[in-house]
Amino acid sequence: MAQLFDTHCHFPQARYKKPVDVLLADARVAGVSLFLDIGTSLKDNKRAIEMAELYPDVYASVGIYPHDDRNYSAEALEQKLEDFLKQSEKIKAIGECGIDSPSPRQGGASDERDTSNYGRTIEQQIELLDMQMRLAIRHNMPIVVHNRGGEDAILILLEKYVSQGLRGVMHCFTQKWEYAQKILEYGFYLAFGGIITYPSGENVLETVQKAPLDRILIETDAPWLVPEPMRSQDRNMPNEPRYIVIIAQKIAQTRGIGYDEIARITYENGKRLFTIGERRDS
Ligand SMILES: [Zn+2]
């Protein structure tokens, strides 16, 4: 069976209706053999590291989401992230970090973030992202970037840091091909998730079709962004890593390439970007 790498998922038990070890077991049955558990806050990073230490096929990323841990300065958070990086060899990336503009996405479905938590200004978000990009360069680790309404700010930061060795992925890519091309020029990867199965995600399909195959990743963003058709059937269900199969199928269908081939390529891409199987050199 084709192996799959869910390069972006979150495993806080409280968000799921079944135990996390059952979630993992169900995903493995579907062919998922690598998971990157993405931390979003101080508390959540600790949780992600614990998961990675517990399960051989789970790796962790540590970062601060644009609106989390607002009581700390960027410098204080930088020190905290440095401390996390010492805790596990299985931390393979910095993130989730990025820009999340204060206007919430339309929809109101279960995959929406709780926007009552919004609060950092764009300037503060840029400062926080800038710090995490420098951290990633210093540790020679890829960065996992969240982008909602931060298109221009992110391009400015990539222009500043890619020449210094910054590499990474634009997670949950939803922009048009024109923007994708700019990101690809900086050497970044594009990760596709549930949104490419939504009617509202149709404008992403041109990018799904045209992006170089060696630069695409697949992800669920579980427990968020349940793919269709399940999303319409039950708006309250959490997403699960096993549904990564649907994302791979959608990409295969959009590009006219076999499912096994998409699984194999995205698996290799993920292992390469996140240096799975290699020792961290910092
Ligand atoms: Zn996420």
Image (cartoon, rainbow, N blue to C red):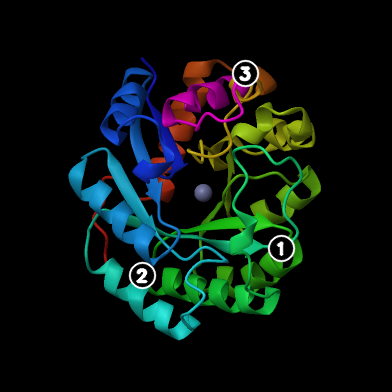
Considering only vertical position in the picture, is 193 above or below 119?
above
Q: Say which residue label 2 marks.
A: 139
3D distance between C-alphas at marks 2 and 1: 28 Å
- Where residue 113 appears, x then y in whole percent? 60, 50
Q: Disc 2 vs disc 1: which is toward the camera?
A: 1
Q: Which mark is residue 179?
A: none
Q: Residue at x 73, y 49 (%)?
A: 105
Residue contact at pointers 1 and 3, CB within 8 angstroms: no
Quadrant for the N terminus in the image: top left
Residue 164, percent across and down?
52, 74
Check disc 1 and give the amino acid type: Ser
Assign a secondary structure to mark 2.
loop
Q: Which residue is mark 3?
A: 233
Is residue 155 something one can see in this rendering?
Answer: yes
Q: Which mark is residue 101?
A: 1
Predominant SS of the magenta segment? helix
- Can residue 11 be seen here? The reply is no
Q: Is residue 248 magenta?
A: yes
Q: Tell me residue 277's x, y (percent).
A: 26, 45
Residue sitting nearer the eye, 216 or 110 = 110
**Is 243 left, or right, of 92 in this rendering?**
right
Picture coordinates of residue 230, whole percent (x, y):
59, 20
**First in sequence: mark 2 vs mark 1:** 1
Q: Quadrant of residue 117?
A: bottom right
Q: Residue at x 59, y 23 (%)?
A: 234
- Alpha carbon separation for disc pair 1 and 3: 29 Å
Q: Which callout, 1 or 3, points at the residue further toward the start of the chain?
A: 1
The residue drawn where x is 48% and y is 38% is 222
Left or right of 137, for residue 107: right
Q: Is 126 in front, or is 182?
A: 126
For marks 2 and 3, give the CA distance.
Answer: 43 Å
**Magenta-tinted stretch:** 233-250
